[in-house]
Image (tube, rainbow, N blue to C red):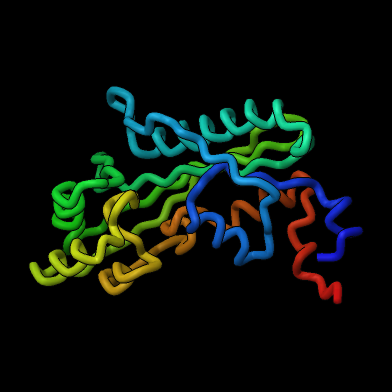
Amino acid sequence: MPAEVKDWRPKLVLASASPRRLALLQQIGLEPDALLPCDLDESPQKNERPKALARRLGREKAEKALSVLKTREDLAGAFIVAADTVVARGSRILPKPEHVEEAAACLRLLSGRQHRVYTGLAVVTPKGAIRERLVESRVVFKHLSRADIESYLASGEWRGKAGGYAIQGRAGSFVIKLVGSFPNVVGLPLYEVQALLGGEGYPVHLNWLNTV
């Protein structure tokens, strides 16, 4: 992008360290000026439902990034994109496993069944207003054999992923049916991101233009 174009474009901040979310933004021509990871306790509150958890964490990440932004003169007037993704089987919220036993339990629970993926999305405007969306996708897994589960666990791809799998990776071969947004299951619903940013005046198509 030519410097003169970049100079007038509003700054964009992604409140995440996730390489998946960054890649999704870049896929639609949105290049963040900064990444502001938000270290939150993502544990559900007592009796908190999956949808409520996704909404709350998405908003809390946005609010935390906004508080950091107020100390960064170089990012003054920036838009912020924040999101959190929750995988649930019924009302049961699945973890983002760091241990193989947790991941194995997730895969056994999802095997041959439908589950839901919720992303709480929050966009902060340069004036500090927060716009929110909750996006839901439904995913059906095939029946997972013992070999499927053991091989997937050995890949390590599950580590830190909501529900213990990454649909954009090897686990894509487990999916029989998906209703809703694929990028939502990966971690960031792109239609809603573009709609919220564009609705607040961010030039979402700027990088689509041929500026050579």
Question: Furthest-left residue in view?
Answer: 146
Residue 48 at what x, y percent from top left?
Answer: 33, 29
Q: Which residue occupies the foreground of this view, 40 or 93?
A: 40
Quadrant hosting residue 4 = bottom right
Residue 115 at what x, y percent from top left?
Answer: 28, 54
Q: Is 65 displayed left or right of 153 in the figure?
A: right
Tally the marks.
0
Q: Which residue occupies the foreground of this view, 88 or 6?
A: 6
The correct choice, above or below, for 128 with respect to 34 in the image is above
Q: Is 205 displayed left or right of 80 in the figure?
A: right
Q: Which residue occupies the foreground of this view, 211 or 84?
A: 211
The correct choice, above or below, for 169 with respect to 133 in the image is below
Residue 97 at what x, y percent from top left?
Answer: 26, 46
Residue at 8%, 67% in the rendered image: 146
Q: Is 137 displayed left or right of 155 in the figure?
A: right
Q: Which residue occupies the foreground of this view, 179 or 48?
A: 48
Residue at 35%, 57% in the rendered image: 138
Q: Is 156 displayed left or right of 13 in the figure?
A: left
Residue at 53%, 33% in the rendered image: 59
